[in-house]
């Protein structure tokens, strides 16, 4: 069976690489794209003439008028939730690659997806190294009661923390709540210097030129520490294979599933 795919954010940094990969895949058919910049044109105007024809729409709601099996949300925080809900309303399974959705957003999405019998696979990051970072961190948290997370990104990234780090904090919270030696309310000085508390973890977001995307979690015990870190390069290639896998697996799911490892044998 060929899956009909609608891709929101098809001309972005990561979305454009994914669009090319979907177009090359024999079992996937890119039937609609969302991009405000190229709305009303064919996707080939943005990505090259070697792609098959694909109309570009300014909004997800308009693109979803073309029937699809899977909707891929790869835009930004401002539109992500509305796009996902619109896709579910149209009866499409959803893959979420955007950052910024909260636990409350996901709870609502899960309720709707469950009611409609549709699958939503939300991945803060599709890279295999991130999937392994999350799994290793969950294992470490079983044995080490203190950790903090550092979230690195380029200076133009608006959402903080990143979707990768949001997902990491969410997963660690399911293992245990960290136990700092000094409770945060007893901080002497500027409380904000201890970072933001997200799902029980202290998170420090750095936004500076020179970074792409990195995530680091540091576990500490007396006289020893463990550092787990993922660093992304300049290209979007590490995310393509994981995103294609998510597109193929989403129709097999019902309700919300967070993390690419949910459909991997790890």
Image (spheres, helix red, strand yellow):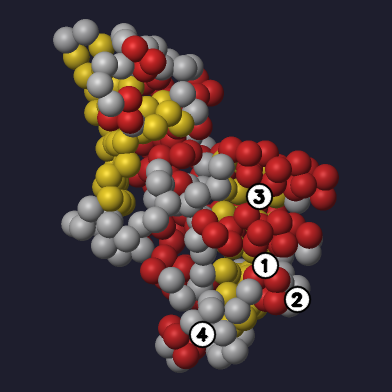
Asked if residue 182 lies left or right of residue 244, the reply is: left
Is residue 23 depicted above or below 97 in this figure? below
Is residue 146 depicted above or below 266 in this figure? above
- If you read the primary sequence from the N terminus, does the residue marked by circle 2 or circle 1 appear first? 1
Q: Quadrant of residue 206?
A: top left
Q: Residues within 10 Å of mark 2 (few under 14, many from 20)?
A: few
**For the residues marked 3 and 2, what is the alpha-carbon distance in whole angstroms?**
19 Å
| Circle 1: element type | strand
Asked if residue 132 lies left or right of residue 40, the reply is: left
Is residue 180 depicted above or below 49 in this figure? above
Of 58 and 256, nearer the camera is: 58
| Circle 3: element type | strand
Q: Residue 135: in sight, yes or no? A: no
Q: Residue 5: in sight, yes or no? A: yes
Q: Residue furthest front?
A: 189
Q: Which mark is residue 260?
A: none
Number of callouts: 4
Q: Which mark is residue 38?
A: 4
Residue found at x 23% / y 53%: 208
- Residue tagged 3: 120
- If you read the primary sequence from the N terminus, does the residue marked by circle 2 or circle 4 appear first? 4
Mark 1 or mark 4, which is nearer to you?
A: 4
- Residue tagged 1: 3
Residue found at x 50% / y 32%: 170
- Residue tagged 2: 65
Residue found at x 32% / y 60%: 156
């Amino acid at each position: 069976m060929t899956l009909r795919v609608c891709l929101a954010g098809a001309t972005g940094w990561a979305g454009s690489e994914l669009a090319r990969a979907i177009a090359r895949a024999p079992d996937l058919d890119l039937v609609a794209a969302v991009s405000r910049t190229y709305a009303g044109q064919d996707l080939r105007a943005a990505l090259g003439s070697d792609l098959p024809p694909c109309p570009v729409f300014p909004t997800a709601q308009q693109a979803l008028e073309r029937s699809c099996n899977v909707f891929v949300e790869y835009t930004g925080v401002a539109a992500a939730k509305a796009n996902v809900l619109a896709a579910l309303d149209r009866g499409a399974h959803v893959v979420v690659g955007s950052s910024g959705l909260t636990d409350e957003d996901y709870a609502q999405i899960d309720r709707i997806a469950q009611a409609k019998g549709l699958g939503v696979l939300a991945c803060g990051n599709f890279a295999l190294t991130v999937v392994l970072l999350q799994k290793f961190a969950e294992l470490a948290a079983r044995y080490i009661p203190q950790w903090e997370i550092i979230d690195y990104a380029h200076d133009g990234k608006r959402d903080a923390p990143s979707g990768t780090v949001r997902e990491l904090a969410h997963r660690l919270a399911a293992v245990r709540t960290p136990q700092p030696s000094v409770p945060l309310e007893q901080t002497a000085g500027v409380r904000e210097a201890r970072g933001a508390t997200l799902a029980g973890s202290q998170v420090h977001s750095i936004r500076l030129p020179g970074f792409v995307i990195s995530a680091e979690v540091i576990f500490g015990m007396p006289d020893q520490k463990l550092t787990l870190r993922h660093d992304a390069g300049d290209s979007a290639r590490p995310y393509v294979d994981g995103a294609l896998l998510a597109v193929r697996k989403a129709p097999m799911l019902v309700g919300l599933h967070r993390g690419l490892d949910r459909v991997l044998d790890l």
